[in-house]
Image (spheres, grey):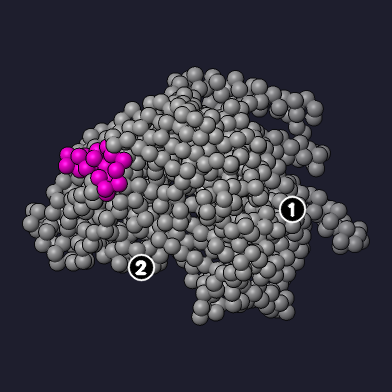
Amino acid sequence: MKNLKLLGVLLASCLALTACGGSDSSKPAASQQAAAGQSVSQQKEITAAVALDFTTMDPMDTSDTLSGGIQRMVMDGLFGFDDNMKVYPMLASGYKANDNATEYTITLRKGIKFTDGTDWNADAALANFKKWADKSLGLKRTTFLSGVLQSFEKVDDYTIKVTLNKPFGAFINNLAHPCCVIMSPKQIAAGPETCAKAPVGTGQYKFVEWVPGDHLTLELNKDWWGFNAEINGGKALAEKDAGFKKITFKPVLEDATRVAMLQSGDAQIIWPVPTENMETLKGDKNVAVNQAEGIVVRYFVMNTQKKPFNDLKVRQALNYGIDKDAYVKVVRNGLASVATSIDGPAVQYYKKNEPVKYDVEKAKALLKEAGYPDGFTTTLMYPNNTLNQKQAEFFKQQLAKIGVNLELKGMESAILNQKVQGARVPGAQAEVDCYLSGWSSSTGDSDWAIRPLVSKESEPPMSYNISYFENDELEGYIAAGLGSADDNIRKEAYAKAQDLIWQQVPMVFLANDFNTWATGSKVSNVKILPDGAINMKNARMSN
Amino acid sequence: MLKYTCRRILGMIPTLIIVVTCVFFFVRLIPGDPARLVAGDQATEADVVAVRVQLGLDQPVPVQYVKYVSGLLHGDLGMSLRTKRPVTEEISTRYGNTLELTFISLIWSTIVGVLFGVWSGTHRGKWQDYLGMTSAVSGISLPAFWVGFLLIMAFAVKLRWFPTTGASSLSSFVLPSITLGISIAAVIARFTRSSIIEVLKEDYIRTARAKGLKEKVVIWKHAFRNSLLSVVTVVGLQFGFLLGGAVVVEAVFAFPGLGSLLIQSVNFRDYPTIQSLILIFSLQFIIINLIVDVLYAVLNPEIKLG
């Protein structure tokens, strides 16, 4: 009996230890900002815990935002994205384009060296263009540029001219994409395997080592040109005392473990923070929690070539019948904003439209008009992880209210991928009726937010037009947007495109995800860009 | 015994050939296109085709098979489709980690399990037995992820005695091996207990006691030695399973081991890695079975091998 009691006390104290501890959620802790010039970050070696393992260090072979974000710390691009996804020149100092968007003359910034001593100049730039145009390498983003590059030549040591084989108004945005960061010509010459394992660039950090599955380490490049206001034409990209001496990134797939690492001090930065843990962390005095609107937009896709979704009224009915505010609250724990376009808000040429008000009666009336007074049955296909299962259940419950019986078909993501994205039949014969998807325009431009999702050329297996949407008027706007480098022409084309898409409802536009991240309270200025990549350029640490 | 061992080792070869062939073809029957999965959602069809060629997946399946098997004969396990690195490289660090975790977990859980089992078995029906078996049932029933998180919250976050994750230092093995070992210790305890109870009924135990031997000697020198056979079987089986990687523990503790590698490879349909891992797991089981069979003969001279 005595020992049983002892065991009970032991177990209880173990549980108590875990339960007690600062749950003061009166005010979330903010980062303690170090005073100007007094950041100690450059003497600190920190750990960052991330959600996935890195895939490669070769930019053009990268399909995930995480690896891309790290590559951007080691290598800079001709252009880059600022905190609001606006393009700004980095290794380039400017550009000029002809009216047809087929010729781009790019001037290069002077006074920059790669960390292996090579000079940054036209030769280095062309070495990178040559790699991007090389289709034989079989890289994952091969067609990103190789499909449009016709020729490129040196005009002088700091000017290059690129000729495209068709008009491509989004070219500069493409160059700002993480897969176009510039690698040292020495590494390119050493071959694709070297590029994948040991990147060398002009960036704020130098690559140290990468043990796959375990960790990846970077160290600060004190000679980075971004610290130098003169090279930058007046304003430096980062404060002189910003950045960390050494950063070790550790892949930690399990959400709760990542959170525990931050709370125990094993990690000083973590992202993303699962929405369920945001409240817990807000109550921890030693942690600063952050959230910001991103450019990932969530959709409820409908196959517009199949009955009943080939009828606009049916699609509109579902649009009225899904409560988007409830979606944000229930599925995203409040960490999202209702979608107002197919574009994310920070995407170039985004145009805002008004979401329809949730109206069950109107939805039922529309269905009746379309010839479905008693509703209908249809299927929803989705990957069967926890988040999507939650979404699926939500939609089933919502659509039941308007008389639509949604049969849930969750399956393993690779199988789903083959059935939906790999389907090789016309939309009317495809298996998919409804589908859950999310997309972000990783180039920050409306072209990449729209064309892969609703253009005829993007129907599976070619790209991501799972709604099999076909509309000639829209094709015209897409072509107009791509066919010119003129800001106003593109803005107008994409405004019309977004309006059309909003009215035609090939998918119900749900929400824009928030990015979430957390740091130790002494760390400040760590950000996540709207595209989901980490931005530590100006990161600082107080004592 | 030597002739027996040699014969068994030779017998491994046809088994392994069957395993390799079956896995190679079955894994390709599962729906899912590795090239598309590796290329990602933002890739166009042209990108996917380029990736497929680069990974050698456009070759006819028999050609891929011959390439893989001839590679095996040279110790080359192929190239991972997911990472484009040699599979040997992917497996080597993780194998070391899993091996170390397996040994540490197995050593402490065997010792604790045996002690609990003998303690319970020799006090059958009394409070020691109930306590021992209740602990064992809890050990088997408590989910590993729950125990793991509890240990993390208590000892890593609150007390900061151990690191939360990883396999970098010896102290980072403590919490994962405790989590892993709890259910194993429980299983070993139960097997040891029933085995000891059976043996204690034997005549020679009565004789030993009648001879006036101390009870400690009776239990440990006579009863325990004879109950070792089933303990060795269970430990052998657990050893084999653990060497296949402990998926849940690896997830909770971000422990870079073979279990998480297998899951990732299956998710990406990384055929060469899946094939090589299953080949290694099969080989391990065969070898462990052989060791266990030889141990039987060592423990009990009455057992004749062959």
Q: Which mark is residue B169?
A: 1
Task: Identify which residue, A506 or A386, lies in the foreground.
Answer: A506
Which of the 4 quarters of the picture holds residue B37?
top left
Q: Quadrant of the C terminus of chain B?
A: top right
Above or below for A288 versus B202: below
Q: Amino acid at mark 2?
A: Lys
Q: Are marks 2 and 1 in contact (CB under 8 Å)?
A: no
Tag 2 residue? A329
Residue at screen point 48% across, 41% down: A92
Q: Which residues are magenta?
A: A465-491
Above or below for B69 versus B275: above
Task: Identify which residue, A479 or B213, lies in the foreground.
Answer: A479
The local secondary structure at tag 2 comes to helix
Give percent across and percent down for residue A118: 62, 34
Q: Quadrant of the N terminus of chain B?
A: top right
Total marks drawn? 2
Residue A270 appears in the rendering: no
Q: Magenta segment: does it hold B288?
A: no
Q: Magenta segment: does it hold A467?
A: yes
Residue A525 located left or right of residue A167: right
Give percent across and percent down for residue B263: 53, 44
Which of the 4 quarters of the picture holds residue A170?
top left
Above or below for A524 versus B58: below
Residue at screen point 58% across, 41% down: A111
Q: CA distance from mark 2 to mark 1?
A: 42 Å
Residue A60 appears in the rendering: yes
Q: Chain of mark 1?
A: B
Give percent across and percent down for residue A304: 20, 45
Q: Amino acid at mark 1?
A: Ser
The local secondary structure at tag 1 comes to loop
